Image (cartoon, rainbow, N blue to C red):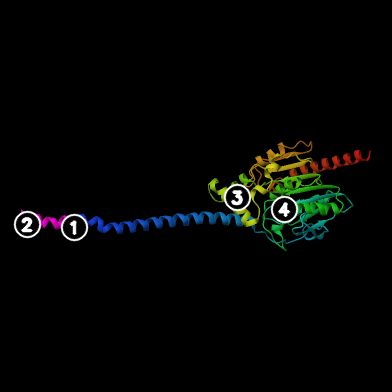
Amino acid sequence: MYSTSQSEAPLHTKVSDLPSSLSPRLIRFKHIVVALLLSVVFFLLFCFIALHGYIAWVLSNPTVAPVFSNPMQAKNMKYEDITFPAADGSRTMQGWYIPANTDTGKTIIFSHGYGANREETWVPMYDLAHYAHQLGFNVVMFDYGFASQVNRAVATGGKAESQQLLGAIQFAKQRGAQELVVWGFSMGAGTALQTGLLTKEVDAMILDSTFLLEPDTLYHNIHNQINLPRQPTLEIMKLLFPVLNGTGLQQIPYQEVKKKDYPFPIFFIHGTEDEKAPYPIAEQLAANQTNPYSEEWIVQGAHHELIFREHPKEYLRRVSTFLSHVTKTISEEVQQNQQ
């Protein structure tokens, strides 16, 4: 009995000592696992934020092709190379002035879209400029800052661009414009609406595929490219935009634009298959207008900025009718003021 208890005692002691001898190793192992898990979490969080930073940077710095032609080469229209300041004096704008064949007080300013320059070949802009010229309009075509070949700037969703368009309007007035129409495309149309909040010098607008930068359209376009959750994606983008392009979403007056009843007639043109700017945006904007000559044309099956390509005859017919109403209205107002 004595020998048995003696032999069991050392064995029992070793078993009891086993957990205590391994506990420091277990603790170190747990620390390593926790550290690895935290490293993975922080790495994934960094990648998530970095992805949003890249998206915000790309949106703020669109790739824009250089100007490859001119009105004379494209459509045998005489033109002048022009420069004029943005209304806030922030930069000098470059463009073309195409005078009408006869003296006229009618001018159309083309407001090109995001990622394009004054030529906007997929519209195609030269064809519409030639059409406006044939109708007896002077034509102004210019590059927004993000499309400049001289001193390129970041795109700001209309904040800076509205001052640049306002500079073009002031230039046209200095050249004798008495009937002034802004013809905008995509973000250039959204910029035109923002500019319309700042001036009374515009007599009418033609807005094709209106894109208004707001949280809904921003997320809609991001989601079309990559399946990110709405939240926190929008909150992260709101934080990044002021850092990367100096403009917060709250600085873009999209709420005011969406409620505004503009004093001048607006012709909204939009396609039901527009993947960048869903057509209900145009319907909502058009519903706010009370000017008797404001109208909308929602084109079944048409795509973003391709409505003229897809329905050229109907497009030009409707634009011509709208412009004739504008000219008639202005003539009547001039006669009333003279009486």
**What residue is pinned by disc 1?**
14
Query: Which residue does the image show at 58% across and 55% down from the upper left?
Result: 55
**What residue is pinned by disc 2?**
3
Q: Which of marks 4 and 1 is nearer the N terminus?
A: 1
Work out how far the residue at label 4 is from the one at label 3, CA to CA, in angstroms.
Answer: 19 Å
Q: In this view, does 81 lie to the left or right of 257?
A: right
Determine whether label 4 and label 3 are within 8 Å by CB.
no
Q: Does the magenta stretch include residue 3?
A: yes
The foreground one among 46 and 192 is 46
Q: Is residue 320 left or right of residue 249?
A: right
For the magenta stretch, what is the residue range? 1-15
Q: In this view, does 73 lie to the left or right of 247?
A: right
Residue type at numbered disc 2: Ser
Residue 234 appears at what percent x and percent y?
57, 48
**Residue 108 visible within the image:** yes
Secondary structure beneath disc 1? Answer: helix
Residue type at numbered disc 1: Lys
Query: Which residue does the image show at 22% across and 57% down from the upper left?
Result: 18
Residue 101 appears at what percent x and percent y?
87, 54
**What residue is pinned by disc 4?**
161
Q: Nearer the viewer, mark 4 or mark 2?
A: 2
Q: Earlier in the sequence, mark 3 or mark 1?
A: 1
Secondary structure beneath disc 4? Answer: helix
Q: In which quarter of the image is the C terminus?
A: top right
What secondary structure prevails in the magenta region?
helix
Q: Which of marks 4 and 2 is nearer the N terminus?
A: 2
Query: Which residue does the image show at 76% across and 40% down from the upper left?
Result: 262
Work out how far the residue at label 2 is from the one at label 3, CA to CA, in angstroms.
Answer: 80 Å
Residue type at numbered disc 4: Glu
Residue 54 image-quadrant placement: bottom right
**What residue is pinned by disc 3?**
238
